[in-house]
Amino acid sequence: MKSSRSSACQPTSHQEVLLDAILLSGDQAVEAWRSWQRDGDIDHLDPASFQIMPLLYWSLARQGVDDPLMGKLKGIYRMAWSRNQWLTSRVLPALRALHEQGVSMMLLKGAALNTLYGEQFGARLIGDVDILVQQGDAQRAAEIVEDLGWIPTDDPPKVTADSISVTKGVGLVRPGGGALDLHWRLFPEDQAAAHEDPAWRYAIAAPIAGVPTLAPNPTEMLMHVCVHGWAWSPHPPFRWVADSMTILRTSSTKIDWERLTEDARRRRLVPQLEAALTYLQARFGADVPMRVLTNLRATPTSRLDRFEYRAKTRRLRTPAGGLTLHVLQFHRLREEAGLGSGIIGFLDYLRREWRLERVAQVPLRMGIKLTRRFTRYLRREAV
């Protein structure tokens, strides 16, 4: 497979300089920070750059950097620390209830990274707490947290066995503030229950505020961070680069590269992982064995998987683009979810995805969604 890079997935050159200031040390880090300041404005940050400022402060402060802007960076860091503590306190009752009901939980994303790698709780700003449960516990877990007042953000809100079969999770909010993402799959593209077994088998203990929880092994953590990071977004959250480099630098000897490669093959996510690791090695000197990249590049991929990769790493903000992603997801999940073939199977997939009772409701819901997306698209293009 040919190695690929997509500018829609990786940071801009200016953002890369900011990452250099975080990931390098000594004079190199200071020079990168000075270079960023020549073209950057800390008072007018894009969302992705703001997310990574607490990491910048922690890195520069550890090295004793004296700079007029350190006061502002410290303020952002303290805000992140307070935000993370508050958000965790809001989620803890739900985590305790799940544990007491015998539901195994695995922290994901920022919550896991802060627990395992965050020397200070504010270093990794989180907007919500992500947890993974096993698919068999998904509906019960949703009911447990809903009984505590957490409200699914989806419409309609009810989590059903049908919706679980074609989705990876549900976002929930709590009156008064707080956000919890309940996952039953690591990746939206892969619904095969057996593919989640290694993540649970090799998970490591990561208790949070006294609640027994797990976190992915560095191998699965790296896979999760890279694949989620290497995707198109209007404001790509390039903190995935810092997350990946943190895992590689602190746990490189614990990464099972053969298991990582096999997991990507099994899940049909080789193009995403290969592109992300290639970029990290080429731009930031990530310690990725060449044999791993060679094996990934030599892995045969289907035409459908290559098309899916292109679709998910490019700008698909039109209504037709959203429908294309649904079609690709249907082809991914058809066999595993027990969906029929052809248009009837696709309509059943949409019924489950949108949590409808009958297939006959799908055309109306599709019309409403397409109209809303087309209206938003026209407004964006008019700006």
Image (cartoon, rainbow, N blue to C red):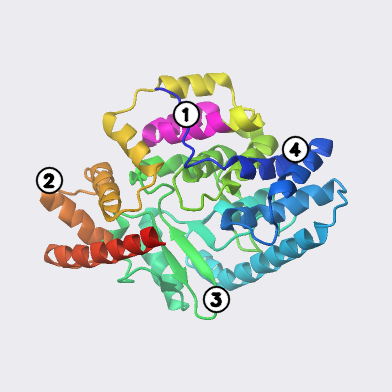
- Which label lies toward us, 2 or 1? 2
Residue topped by disc 1: 261
Residue 262 within the segment the image draws in magenta:
yes
Q: Position of residue 208 (x, y in %)?
A: 64, 60
How far apart marks 2 and 4 lie (CA) works out to 52 Å
Label count reads: 4
Residue annotated with mark 4? 24
Q: Residue 342: which disc?
A: 2
Can you give x and y, in whole percent of width and height, for residue 74 in the image?
A: 78, 61
Q: Amino acid at mark 3?
A: Gly
Verify CB contact (< 8 Å) between mark 3 and mark 1: no
Q: Which residues are magenta?
A: 257-279
Q: Are marks 2 and 4 in contact (CB under 8 Å)?
A: no
Q: Quick one: label 2, few (<14), some, or many (20+) residues within 10 Å?
A: few
Secondary structure under the numbered disc 3 in the rendered image: loop
Q: Which residue is mark 3?
A: 177
Which type of secondary structure does the marked residue at label 1 adopt? Answer: helix
Where residue 3 sits, quadrant-wise, is top left
